[in-house]
Amino acid sequence: MGRDNDEARAHWVEVPREYNAASHFIDRHLLEARDGKTAYVDDKGSYRYADLAGRVNRAGNVLAGLGVEMEQRVLLCVLDGIDFVALFWGALKIGAVPVPVNTLLTPADYDFMLRDSRAKVLAVSASLFDRFETVIESQPHLKSVVVVGGGEPGSSDPPNGNVHVTSFHQLQAGADATLEPARTVADDVAFWLYSSGSTGRPKGVIHLHRSLVQTAALYACRILDMSESDVVFSASKLFFAYGLGNALSFPLHVGATAILMAERPTPAAVIRTLATHQPTIFCGVPTLYAGLLADETLVASLGTQSTQRLRICTSAGEALPEPIARRWKDRFGVEILDGLGSTEALHIFLSNRAGAIRYGSSGVPVPGYELALRDEHGNETGAGEIGDLWCRGPSIGTGYWNNQEASSRAFVGGWLRTGDKYLRDADGYYHFAGRSDDMLKVGGIWVSPFEVETVLLEHPQVREAAVIGAADAQNLVKPKAFVVLQDSRDASADLAEELKEFVKVRVAPYKYPRWIEFRDELPRTATGKLRRFELS
């Protein structure tokens, strides 16, 4: 273990003790004569690195002017665009702690996050403001709300006078465009990200100033070979750890250009963005890739010219089924690098690599990360045996905010217990076997829902599938499948029986689903992860 850790550490980026991440990701580009290069393109225009630096400084000064001090939280419920980027880095530059949150939640969710984070300032897109109106006045810690985007209200005070609501753009217009970075250190808290809540209530994961550069150097540079000439489009949003790396830290680390899209990443919106901006790197999730492939008319509208520059695609959020990966490669001639990451680890730490893809696997460890498979007693499992995946590396969060019990279970002696079950083959590739709390024991034998789902996806009429455990007449657990068809009109009892037999002849017979239920869609988080606990 000691030697393995030394080898992993050899890939880490050395960060000085006195360090503010905004200096590296924002200010450095002006010193390196990149000020005239395009940093971002969003729905409203394009922005050079010099424009970005000025916007970040103004945003930081706006927050400081509202009384935000070092280490205080700023909740960001802002759609993807240049204002998100400016507010995130502006908060971080003054030593405050930006907390990006999912833009698709309910008022009750936001009430919880505001109380849990104790945010002093909320920045919210104008189109999302109505979701906060009923909760902001009762917040015990919130002092100011800045509304971002069109239709912003003027300055006002609610009836109780506790929370001041004003326009971000009005404040930004009068703010100073110069700002010295706060004298933070590498181990200062930089930002939080809330876990997706795929298994229940989200938890605030704490990340440090030194973490962002590690994921950029280890994954973006070593796995994607990202460079200044790349144009990156991430369908996964900035509030998601995967999207934050793809479209925020990665391009800013190498001086590339990133495309931001405010609207939801529907297949039609993604196709339109791919056609318009012709990125070289596209980052999606399995559900989106499946949705794109399901609409051949929509995909055909791209044309070959629109994807000529596309050199690599990535996938995360959940395991990419082999049938989807192969169909994408056949259709576009571009590989999808499937990988595993998490909010707790900040980005992908296990990945396939260009030219060395093993379909159906999550690849091999990203340089700088150390992985182990362990049984329920913490002992390492043998080759080919399923075990709980543990990860150690330079971007692991320090724990969950205000949740010591959950932190002590997940963060153990420098290791992260990922909650995933994997097996490692003879060549060192890791194969997903399911979430630790998703595994089924059928007839005394462990069954991976993902294995059954992958087989179902090989059937030409199946678009999506999810497998859970259900009790039979004897109260014994057996697999049950929920299936979304390519054409919902094909659903029938005969097709259900056909799918059962389709699985039974391709895996061990005890693994086949005893019940098939057809659904129009499967419950998922905003980041695309399956919410199995909502299926029954």
Image: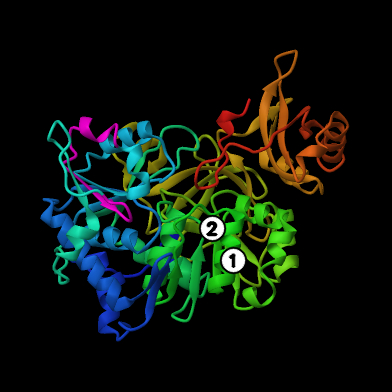
Residue type (three-letter) at the residue carrying disc 2:
Leu
Whether residue 116 is visible: yes
Question: For the point 47% across and 81% down, which residue is it?
Answer: 229
**Residue 141 counted in the magenta span:** yes
Along the viewing direction, whichever of 383 and 469 lies nearer the viewer: 469
Write down the residue under mark 2: 350
In this rendering, position of residue 393 left or right of residue 270: left
Question: For the point 66% across and 52% down, which residue is it?
Answer: 291
Q: CA distance from mark 2 to mark 1?
A: 15 Å
The residue sitting at the bottom extreme is: 33
The residue sitting at the top extreme is: 474
* Residue 31 in the image, given as x and y percentages of width and height: 25, 83
**Closer to the camera: disc 2 or disc 1?**
1
Q: Quadrant of the C terminus?
A: top right
Residue type (three-letter) at the residue carrying disc 1:
Cys
**How would you classify the magenta stretch by its main secondary structure?**
loop
Write down the residue under mark 1: 313
In this rendering, position of residue 534 left or right of residue 303: left
* Residue 345 in the image, given as x and y percentages of width and height: 42, 52
Residues drawn in magenta = 133-152
Task: Give the class, few, some or many, for how many residues have Cα within 10 Å of label 1's Cα (few <14, many ≥20).
Answer: many
Along the viewing direction, whichever of 523 and 501 lies nearer the viewer: 523
Q: Quadrant of the N terminus?
A: bottom left
